Amino acid sequence: MKMLSRNPVVTTLILLLPLVSFLLLLGGAPLFDVDEGAFSEATREMFARGDFLSTYLNGEHRFDKPILVYWFQALGYLIFGATEWAFRLPSAIAALIWSYATWYFARQRFGPDTALAALAVAATAIGPFAIGRAATADALLNMLLALALFDAWRHLESGQRAPLLRSYVWIGLGVLTKGPIALIVPGTVTLLYCASRGEWKRWARSVFDPAGWAILAVLALPWYIYALFTHGQNFIDGFILKHNVERFTGTLEGHTGSLFYYIFAVPLLLLPWTSPLIASLRNIRADAGTGVRRFLWIWAGFVVVFFSLSGTKLPHYVLYGSTPLFLLIAAHRDSLRRGWLHFTPVTLLLALFVALPLVFDLLSASSAGNAYYRAQLADALTRADATYYVVTLGCLLLWLALAWRLPAGIWSKMMIGGGLQVLALTTVVVPWVGSVLQGPVKEAAAFVRERPEPVVAWRLDVPSLSVYREAVTPSRAPAAGELAVTRIDRVPETGYETLFLKGGVAVVRQQAAEE
């Protein structure tokens, strides 16, 4: 294939791709519940309470995650106000740094062409795309884990101490972002790599570096000490035991899966690069003889195995091991054959985007799921305007024409397909999905915000309601004179009048008792 880096136009387009992926129409969709709504409302309540060291969700303690991501979201809130853009901006910036750090690492070790190829994968794979545009802690942690392990490799490669100490900085910030996992992944990956080479003492010297631990302690300990002394046993039970120990040893919030859950999740999260990923697996044995490639496979493999053993399974957990896969997929791009096979995932995705309104409409008329989600999906066709079909169908037809007629290699065409996938997602698909699934919640918030009555959330877990109301919304049954935002399938048949109804969301008020 032609050298990517020798074409300045191609190089510029690839370097700009992350900016499109993670910033274009970042605020175009409403906040998705539960996670985006919960993080955003906890940040909003920091300002309402004047407390920037503890997090609360609708007035109740929230111990799900440490404090760092909330501080970054608070900066966005301070500058842009309570907008989707503000709450998502820290994740978008983290995803940008994550992508460009991957490019820079690859450029030094694999060359400029592989670096550009890896950047294209990082910027277009659907899993990183999703968390890079979500108001949660995951993009930030992925960035910090990537920086930590890149610097860990630089230390192992050169013996220099500066990258080792930098890795402690990233780990310390990671512990302040999501807890012990920021220690476990870098510590175990480097252990397994050094063990594979019989370099136990080298690992011990780097892991027990006194200056490194001092850096980590200065960054992470003050907030943990504050949280422990302020909240005591509640912090231990909520953060340490429930959201760390129990999350690994048991199943939280129904997020379970088989031992093979991530074997299927990884290829889906790396769409449209699934076929190149599978093709690269053939090179594991050969790669084991090359230091950096061995390190990358160990990194990816440990994350898959570790989270496969966890009782709680969520797709984005395995993205902590996706960074090395960006690099390995790119490194083996010249071995791709049978272009139609590698083009199939992006073709199916683009076709799915065109058909999605119809799919949602059919689901709404079926017996699948529950009445709430069927009611939400019932507006799918109405909310899909002409622009939606023009963009999605246009991207599909353009892709088919280029894949069939463009005189370019498999990899070049795949990058175009990935770029078209991102274009469709950012401009119309994600905003439309957000409108269908979350539009009724946002509209209900606007309705009750204009009302003088107190408001509660009743049998409906949508923290974004509080964000859009800019007020705490207690979760309980309504008292006399209160409005309740609830699901249409959970409204009693009698005793309540419906004041607002959109999709599956209703605002009801208790009727006065008849005399």
Image (cartoon, rainbow, N blue to C red):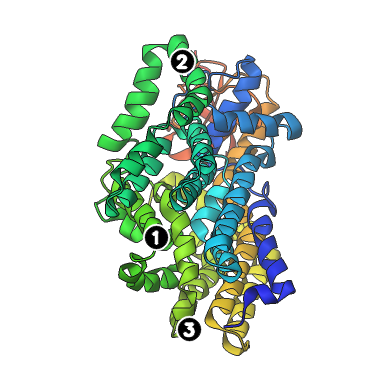
Residue type at the position of mark 2: Ile
Image location of residue 214, percent across then percent down: 48, 25
The amino acid type found where label 3 is placed reads Gly
| Residue pictured at 72% horizontal, 28% vertical | 78
Q: Is residue 364 visible?
A: no
Q: Is residue 102 above or below residue 463?
A: below
Q: Earlier in the sequence, mark 3 or mark 1?
A: 1
Residue at left offset 33%, top offset 55%:
301
Position above or below: 485 against 85: above
Q: Quadrant of residue 313?
A: top left
* Position above or below: 140 against 44: below
Q: Position of residue 447 (x, y in %)?
A: 66, 33
Would you name the residue on which mark 1 appears? Answer: 291
| Left or right: residue 396 compared with residue 182 | right
Q: Which residue is mark 2?
A: 225
Q: Which mark is residue 339?
A: 3
C-alpha distance separating marks 3 and 2: 55 Å
Q: Residues within 10 Å of mark 2 (few under 14, many from 20)?
A: few
Q: Earlier in the sequence, mark 3 or mark 2?
A: 2
Q: Nearer the viewer, residue 150 or 1?
A: 150
Three-letter code, disc 1 = Gly
